[in-house]
Image (tube, rainbow, N blue to C red):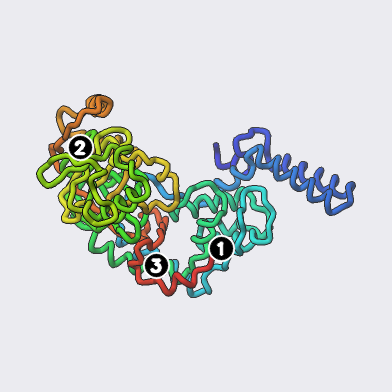
C-alpha cells in the first residue's frame, strides 16, 4: 500500500478516503443530535468504533503512525553486542525514573478489547511512558480500544507473558513493577552480559533461565526458539558453559537420589502402587531387581536403591534426552507433561530443563552428523528402540541468568528474578499488584 493511501486512512479498503470518513462523522453527529440523549450517543459511538475496526481503519492508521516494534524472533538474547545494546537503553529508563516513573494501574479482574473501565486512562499512560503505546495516539479515553490492545500485546511479548492482549493478574503484576526496579535490573544485567557475550561461537544453544526459554543460534540468528520448563526456586537450574555432545533416543530415566528423597518416598507413602503404574523398577547395589513392597517407605532405606524408569511415552524424559558434561548432573529433555509449556510460570523441574518441540532442536543439533537425518530420527523415535547419537561436532551450550536485556533494534525485555539473584527483593516487594 502506498504512503498516500495510508495517509488517507484507507487500510486495505480502496474506497475509504479522508472525505468518506468526514462524511461518515458528519452523519454520525447528525444522528446523535437527532437522538438527543447521552445513552443514544454512547450507542452510536460504539457503532462507529465497530465499523472502523471492521474496515481496519484503526489498524491502518496505527501502522502508519507508529514506529513501535515487537521483539524480533530472529534476534538472540545472548550476542556479542548484547551488553552494549543493553547499556545504551539505560539513559532512557533513567529519564523515565527522573520524571517520576509510571503510574500504578488499579487492580482489575480482566480488561480486554471493547471494555470501558476507569483504569484504562492510567493503563494508556503507563504504556505510553514505557514506549509500548505511541504517545501521539495514546489518548485518554476509558475504552480499551485497538491501540491499547496492541500496546498490551507488545508489553506482554517484552515480558515473556502470554501474548493475548488481555490484562489479567500476571500482566497487571508486570505493569506495576516500578520503573526504578526495571532500571536497576538493566544496570545489574549489563555487568552479567559483559562476562557472557564474548567468544560465543557461530553455532550454539542458549538457555535463559529466568525466561524459561531456549534458543538455537547460528551465525548470529535464532533459527529456532523453544519454551522451556526450568528448575523450581528451591531446586534452581545452574549457570553452565559447556558443550552438547550426545542425544539419547527413547531413554531410560534413572531417578536422582535427591528426587527419591524429596518426591518418591513421600509419594510411595501415599500411593503404594506408584512405581508399578509408572513402570519404575528398583535395583539393589548388585543390580538385582527388588519388589517395591520389600522396601520400608517410612524410612530413608529407599535412598540406597537405584530407580530406573523404562522407555516409553510415560517416561519422565519423553523420547529424547540431550547430554552435556556438567558437575551438576543436569540435562535437557522431552517430557510427557506438555501442558506446562503453556503456562506463564514455568519453573517446576528439579534443575534439568524440559524443552518444547525438542525434536526440532535435536534435528538441528544433528544436522552435521551422518546417519541422523530428520527421517532417521523420526524412525528411531517411532520404533521405541534405545539408541544414542554422538554429535560429529559438539555444540556450545550456555545456561545463563539474564533478567533484562536489549536487542540492537532497541527493544527492551524483562523477566522475573525467579531465583532472587538481582538483589532487588526489597525494591520488588514494593511493586504493586
Visible residue check, residue 85: no
122 w.r.t. 309: above or below: below
Q: Position of residue 373 (x, y in %)?
A: 22, 28
| Secondary structure under the numbered disc 1 in the rendered image | helix
- What residue is drawn where x is 29% and y is 35%? 359
- What residue is drawn where x is 32% and y is 54%? 231
| Secondary structure under the numbered disc 3 in the rendered image | helix
**Is residue 380 shown left or right of residue 157?**
left
Q: Which residue is mark 1?
A: 126
State which quadrant residue 338 falls in.
top left
In front: label 3 or label 1: 1
Q: Position of residue 58 (x, y in %)?
A: 63, 45
How many angstroms separate mark 1 from mark 2 (CA)? 48 Å
Taking depth in this image into account, of 354 and 164 the one nearest to the observer is: 354
Q: Earlier in the sequence, mark 1 or mark 2?
A: 1
- What residue is drawn where x is 23% and y is 45%? 294
Taking depth in this image into account, of 221 and 367 the one nearest to the observer is: 367
Q: Mark 1, residues whose alpha carbon is within 10 Å: few (<14), some, or many (≥20)? A: many
| Secondary structure under the numbered disc 2 in the rendered image | strand
Visible residue check, residue 215: yes
Q: Earlier in the sequence, mark 3 or mark 1?
A: 3
How many angstroms separate mark 2 from mark 3 (CA)? 44 Å
- What residue is drawn where x is 40% and y is 71%? 425
Q: Which residue reaches farthest left?
A: 286
Q: Which residue is mark 2?
A: 248
- Residue 226 is marked as none
Q: Which residue is mark 3?
A: 90
For the image, the number of numbered tags is: 3
Q: Position of residue 269 (x, y in %)?
A: 34, 51
In front: label 2 or label 3: 2
Q: Earlier in the sequence, mark 2 or mark 3?
A: 3
**Is residue 413 shown left or right of residue 312?**
right
Amino acid at each position: 500500500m502506498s504512503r498516500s493511501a495510508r495517509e488517507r486512512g484507507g487500510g486495505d479498503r480502496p474506497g475509504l478516503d479522508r472525505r468518506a470518513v468526514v462524511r461518515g462523522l458528519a452523519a454520525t453527529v447528525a444522528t446523535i443530535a437527532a437522538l438527543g440523549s447521552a445513552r443514544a450517543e454512547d450507542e452510536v459511538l460504539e457503532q462507529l468504533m465497530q465499523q472502523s475496526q471492521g474496515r481496519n481503519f484503526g489498524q491502518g492508521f496505527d501502522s502508519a503512525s507508529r514506529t513501535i516494534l515487537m521483539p524480533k524472533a530472529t534476534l538472540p538474547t545472548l550476542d556479542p553486542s548484547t551488553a552494549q545494546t543493553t547499556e545504551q537503553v539505560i539513559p532512557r529508563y533513567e529519564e523515565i525514573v527522573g520524571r517520576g516513573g509510571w503510574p500504578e494501574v488499579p487492580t482489575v479482574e480482566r480488561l480486554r478489547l471493547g471494555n470501558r473501565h476507569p483504569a484504562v486512562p492510567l493503563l494508556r499512560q503507563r504504556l505510553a511512558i514505557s514506549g509500548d503505546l505511541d504517545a501521539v495516539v495514546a489518548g485518554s479515553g476509558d475504552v480499551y480500544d485497538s491501540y491499547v490492545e496492541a500496546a498490551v500485546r507488545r508489553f506482554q511479548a517484552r515480558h515473556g507473558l502470554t501474548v493475548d492482549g488481555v490484562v489479567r493478574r500476571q500482566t497487571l503484576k508486570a505493569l506495576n513493577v516500578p520503573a526504578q526496579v526495571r532500571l536497576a535490573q538493566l544496570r545489574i544485567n549489563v555487568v552479567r552480559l559483559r562476562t557472557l557475550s564474548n567468544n560465543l561461537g557461530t553455532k550454539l544453544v542458549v538457555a535463559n533461565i529466568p525466561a524459561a526459554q531456549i534458543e538455537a543460534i547460528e551465525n548470529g540468528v535464532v533459527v529456532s526458539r523453544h519454551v522451556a520448563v526450568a528448575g523450581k526456586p528451591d531446586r534452581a537450574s545452574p549457570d553452565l558453559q559447556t558443550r552438547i555432545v550426545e542425544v539419547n533416543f527413547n531413554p531410560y530415566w534413572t531417578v536422582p537420589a535427591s528426587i527419591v528423597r524429596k518426591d518418591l518416598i513421600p509419594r510411595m507413602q501415599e500411593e503404594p502402587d506408584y512405581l508399578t503404574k509408572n513402570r519404575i523398577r528398583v535395583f539393589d547395589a548388585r543390580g538385582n531387581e527388588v519388589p517395591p513392597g520389600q522396601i520400608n517407605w517410612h524410612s530413608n532405606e529407599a535412598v540406597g536403591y537405584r530407580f530406573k524408569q523404562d522407555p516409553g511415552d510415560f517416561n519422565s524424559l519423553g523420547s529424547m534426552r540431550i547430554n552435556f558434561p556438567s558437575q551438576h548432573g543436569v540435562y535437557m529433555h522431552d517430557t510427557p507433561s506438555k501442558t506446562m509449556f503453556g503456562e506463564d510460570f514455568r519453573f517446576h523441574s528439579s534443575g534439568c530443563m524440559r524443552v518444547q518441540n525438542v525434536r526440532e532442536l535435536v534435528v538441528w543439533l544433528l544436522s552435521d552428523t551422518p546417519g541422523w537425518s530428520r527421517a532417521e530420527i523420526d524412525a528411531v523415535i517411532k520404533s521405541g528402540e534405545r539408541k544414542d547419537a554422538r554429535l560429529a561436532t559438539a555444540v556450545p551450550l550456555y545456561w545463563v541468568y539474564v533478567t533484562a536485556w536489549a536487542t540492537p533494534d532497541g527493544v527492551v525485555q524483562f523477566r522475573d528474578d525467579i531465583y532472587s539473584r538481582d538483589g532487588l527483593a526489597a525494591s520488588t516487594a514494593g511493586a504493586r499488584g
